[in-house]
Image (spheres, coloured by chain):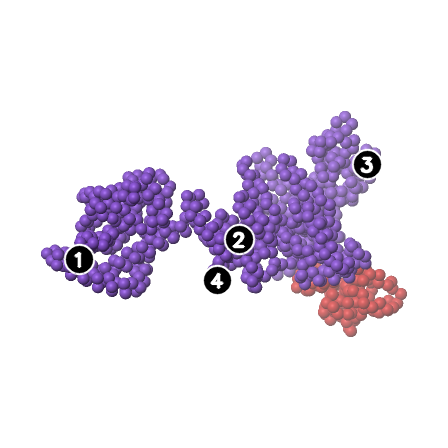
Chain colours: A purple, B red
């Protein structure tokens, strides 16, 4: 294991030059086996694939330029090396011979590098199969990559280095000339040597360039290794290096290049290291959640860049503590490093494509406002209330209005889980108003925030609770309403042109202070039903066709039809229901009391509710629907309790009359279509959810018919 | 010749001179014998009425009568159409009625 430590210490960069002394040399057929020593630690090494004479002796010091460590066999496989020069001339000569030979070998090795690398790669693959230790595998992978890069870099840099080092080369050439003369005298007999000398004169430039290349390549390799390690692993041992690097950076002033900052539009999932100038637009409370008995927490943020794009950023678990107290909404930051992935549509502000996750290397450093010259403040895209009705559910929008009718704080308790706070309000904007819901800490604080805002206004007449909300979600339930999300933000008394308009309108139309009861309001409730487009209107024959097909069934259809037949058996069309208006379960009579299994209450009375099977017809076809209390009451004209009374009084004439007048009246009906499986067959049920007499909707109907006629052309 | 009381706009009056028509419009003037209605295509048409006829009691009125050569209508009867009439939709319908005679007019061969 000492050898391993040696290798580790070598690799960690403390020793860029690996110099080992040779203890033993053993020459075999294809290999030279060496016992190398570094201070006190010994390691085996082999040199393979040499083509020229090698004269390594005990006591020589070699510098390893290219090598690999084989953990299984515990030896270093040396590919390139050079023998270090001493000051003695004699030794120089010997060593120069050695050097030449070494350099020749280096040359050959460089020339046949590609072949070597192929073989090396094969070796690597074998080694990978054999090895089980992660570090070694990493090392080899890196070295593979390094080799490939080396090729490219050697080619790239040869040209550069040649130009730069010409002067040095000239000096060396002169020296070498002198040396060569001496050598020639000594080795006149050997032709090969002469040739080698000549070759060496010509090639020494290249060799020395290559050596310098290789040294620089080593530098680069090490730099890139550091980079790769940062990118690849969070759990590697080399985190220590990273920490050191980080601490040195933090201690210095914010040192960044503004030109290198990117915009959100330039992000892609492959990037992890980048700089961006951002403004923090939204920040909410940390949320805890449990998955499979593991609790974790997250903190969502919204960032905005110089081009008014927005993006969601999430901090998880431990990193939250690092940032939560430091970052504030509205401030300018330099955001560095993060993980990019595709955004979830539901949470993406302004339809951003990506979202960011904080990683340990992420930094948010506060920037002085001088960088914010071109940086917009928080940007609103206000939606006029008249358009809210046509916006799809779940969309995030910005709105502005006057907050009124703030309900008291409610606590919603879920069984077993944490409870949440809720508050309702009404947002008024000229002619329109819409319900809005607040949750969590916003619900808790909004009343006091509003008070503080109003207190800050000096003049009594101006004390209007005008507020702009950013990124609230449009929801639909019997009409459209708004709800606050994690990342919605409120801005009291914003300095926007729309704010002035709303204020002026409000002031004109109030006779009294406080609530403006004189404002004409078009409530946005039920609007989802009121404005029925032609696309949702069906002929009953078409509905029946769709239902036979059972594919692509719309959830709701609107039809114009009349009730052609309904069951008149009073026992079958009514059932005793729970008194609780929210619970409509059937109650069971227990002696004199009615018991509800849902609410678990006993009551003396019950509320009868309709559940009528009826047949609806238009001029094309008929369909069967079931209708419940609200619709039944509308059709028949009386409540189920009253009908029950008539039954008990045996007033058959009145009952007859009621049913007669209910039939064959034209309504616009909203029907919900549901698929379910009954006795292994797919069945479809139609529920009559809502209906309006046609007389009340003639205008709409006329328009729809006109559109239909126009289509005929 | 068949007796058809066609629903007309101001633009259709010239084709129906001497014939009986139904004309719906918004009441703008009502003075004794003469009334003025705003046609669906936004032209004022004068209506000549019987001296002792009932007054119009709603904003929108349908008048049945014959067309004079000066494109006024001599009223024979009227119906109150209430105050919430969508004249624009009615106008569109009138335009379509000329384009789709098969829908709006009974079969002439019968």
Q: Mark 2 vs mark 4: give the one in front.
A: 2
Tags 4 and 3 in contact by the CB under 8 Å rule? no
Number of other residues with Cα within 10 Å of mark 4, as a class: few under 14, some 14 to 19, many 20 or more: few
Rendered position, B99 above or below A606: below
Picture quadrant where residue A237 is located: top left
Can residue A699 be seen here?
no
Can residue B76 be seen here?
yes
Residue furthest left as drawn: A189
Residue A196's disc number: 1
Residue A646's disc number: 3
Rendered position, B86 above or below A29: below
Give whichever of A136, A263 is nearer the camera. A136
Q: Chain of mark 3?
A: A
Residue A364's disc number: 2
Q: Position of residue A512 (x, y in %)?
A: 81, 57
Q: CA distance from mark 2 to mark 4?
A: 18 Å
Residue furthest right as drawn: B52
**N-terminal-most mark, 2 or 4:** 4
**N-terminal-most mark, 3 or 2:** 2
Could you tell me which secondary element the residue under label 4 belongs to? helix
* Horizontal side of residue A637 vs A189, given as left or right: right
Tags 3 and 1 in contact by the CB under 8 Å rule? no
Q: Residue at x 17, y 57 (%)?
A: A196
Q: CA distance from mark 4 to mark 1?
A: 52 Å
Number of other residues with Cα within 10 Å of mark 1, as a class: few under 14, some 14 to 19, many 20 or more: some
Number of other residues with Cα within 10 Å of mark 3, as a class: few under 14, some 14 to 19, many 20 or more: some
Q: Residue at x 18, y 60 (%)?
A: A179
The N terminus of chain A, quarter of image: top left
Number of other residues with Cα within 10 Å of mark 2, as a class: few under 14, some 14 to 19, many 20 or more: some
């Amino acid at each position: 294991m000492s050898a391993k430590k040696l290798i580790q210490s070598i690799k960690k960069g403390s020793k860029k030059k690996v110099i080992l002394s040779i203890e033993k040399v053993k020459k075999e057929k294809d290999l030279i086996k060496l016992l190398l020593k570094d201070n006190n630690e010994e390691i085996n090494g082999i040199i393979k694939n040499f083509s020229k004479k090698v004269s390594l002796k005990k006591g020589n010091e070699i510098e390893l330029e290219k090598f690999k460590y084989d953990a299984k066999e515990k030896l270093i496989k040396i590919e390139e090396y050079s023998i270090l020069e001493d000051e003695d001339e004699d030794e120089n000569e010997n060593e120069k011979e050695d050097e030449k030979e070494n350099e020749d070998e280096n040359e050959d090795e460089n020339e046949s590098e590609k072949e070597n690398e192929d073989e090396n790669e094969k070796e690597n693959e074998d080694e990978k199969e054999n090895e089980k230790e992660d570090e070694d595998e990493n090392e080899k992978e890196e070295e593979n990559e390094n080799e490939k890069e080396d090729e490219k870099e050697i080619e790239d840099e040869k040209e550069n280095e040649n130009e730069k080092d010409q002067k040095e080369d000239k000096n060396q050439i002169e020296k070498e000339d002198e040396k060569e003369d001496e050598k020639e005298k000594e080795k006149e007999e050997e032709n090969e040597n002469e040739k080698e000398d000549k070759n060496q004169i010509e090639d020494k430039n290249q060799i020395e360039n290559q050596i310098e290349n290789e040294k620089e390549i080593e530098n680069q390799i090490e730099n890139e290794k550091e980079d790769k390690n940062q990118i690849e692993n969070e759990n590697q041992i080399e985190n220590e290096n990273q920490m050191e690097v980080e601490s040195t950076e933090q201690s210095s002033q914010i040192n960044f290049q503004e030109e290198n900052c990117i915009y959100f539009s330039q992000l892609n999932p492959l990037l992890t290291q980048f700089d961006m100038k951002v403004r923090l637009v939204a920040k909410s409370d940390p949320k805890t959640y449990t998955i499979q008995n593991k609790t974790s927490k997250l903190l969502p943020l919204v960032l905005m860049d110089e081009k008014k794009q927005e993006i969601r950023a999430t901090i998880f678990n431990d990193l939250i503590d690092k940032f939560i107290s430091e970052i504030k909404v509205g401030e300018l930051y330099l955001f560095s490093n993060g993980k990019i992935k595709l955004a979830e549509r539901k949470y993406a502000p302004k339809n951003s494509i990506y979202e960011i996750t904080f990683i340990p290397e992420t930094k948010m450093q506060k920037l002085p406002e001088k960088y914010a010259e071109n940086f917009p403040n928080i940007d609103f895209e206000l939606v006029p209330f008249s358009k809210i009705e046509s916006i799809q559910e779940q969309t995030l929008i910005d709105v502005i209005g006057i907050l009124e009718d703030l309900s008291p704080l409610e606590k919603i308790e879920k069984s077993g889980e944490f409870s949440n706070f809720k508050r309702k309000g009404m947002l008024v904007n000229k002619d329109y108003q819409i319900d809005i819901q607040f949750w969590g800490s916003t619900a808790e604080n909004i009343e006091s925030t509003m008070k503080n805002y109003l207190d800050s206004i000096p003049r009594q007449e101006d004390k209007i609770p005008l507020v702009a909300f950013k990124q609230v979600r449009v929801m639909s339930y019997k009409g459209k309403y708004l709800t606050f999300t994690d990342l919605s933000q409120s801005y009291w008394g914003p300095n926007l042109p729309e704010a002035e308009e709303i204020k002026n309108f409000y002031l004109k139309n109030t006779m009294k202070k406080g609530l403006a009861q004189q404002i004409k309001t078009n409530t946005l409730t039920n609007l989802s039903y009121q404005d029925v487009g032609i696309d949702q209107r069906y002929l009953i024959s078409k509905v029946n066709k769709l239902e036979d097909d059972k594919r692509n069934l719309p959830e709701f259809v609107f039809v114009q039809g009349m009730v052609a037949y309904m069951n008149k058996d009073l026992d079958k069309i009514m059932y005793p229901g729970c008194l609780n208006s929210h619970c409509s379960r059937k109650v069971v009579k227990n002696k004199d009391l009615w018991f509800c299994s849902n609410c678990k209450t006993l009551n003396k009375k019950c509320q009868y509710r309709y559940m009528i099977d009826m047949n609806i017809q238009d001029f094309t076809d008929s369909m069967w629907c079931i209708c419940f209390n609200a619709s039944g009451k509308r059709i028949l004209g009386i409540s189920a309790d009253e009908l029950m009374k008539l039954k008990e009084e045996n007033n058959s004439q009145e009952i007859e009359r009621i049913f007669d007048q209910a039939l064959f009246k034209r309504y616009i009906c909203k029907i919900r279509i549901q698929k379910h499986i009954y006795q292994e067959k797919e069945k479809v049920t139609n529920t009559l959810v809502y209906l309006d007499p046609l007389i009340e909707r003639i205008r709409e109907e006329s328009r729809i018919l006109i559109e239909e006629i126009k289509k005929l052309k | 010749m068949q007796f058809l009381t066609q629903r007309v706009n101001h633009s259709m009056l010239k084709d129906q001179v001497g014939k009986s028509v139904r004309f719906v419009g918004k009441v703008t003037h009502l003075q004794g014998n003469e009334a003025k209605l705003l046609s669906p295509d936004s032209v004022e048409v004068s209506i000549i009425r019987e001296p002792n006829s009932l007054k119009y009691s709603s904003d929108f009125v349908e008048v049945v009568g014959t067309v004079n050569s000066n494109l006024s209508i001599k009223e024979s009867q009227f119906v109150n159409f209430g105050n919430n009439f969508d004249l624009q939709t009615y106008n569109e319908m009138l335009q379509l009625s000329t384009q789709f005679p098969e829908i709006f007019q009974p079969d002439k061969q019968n």
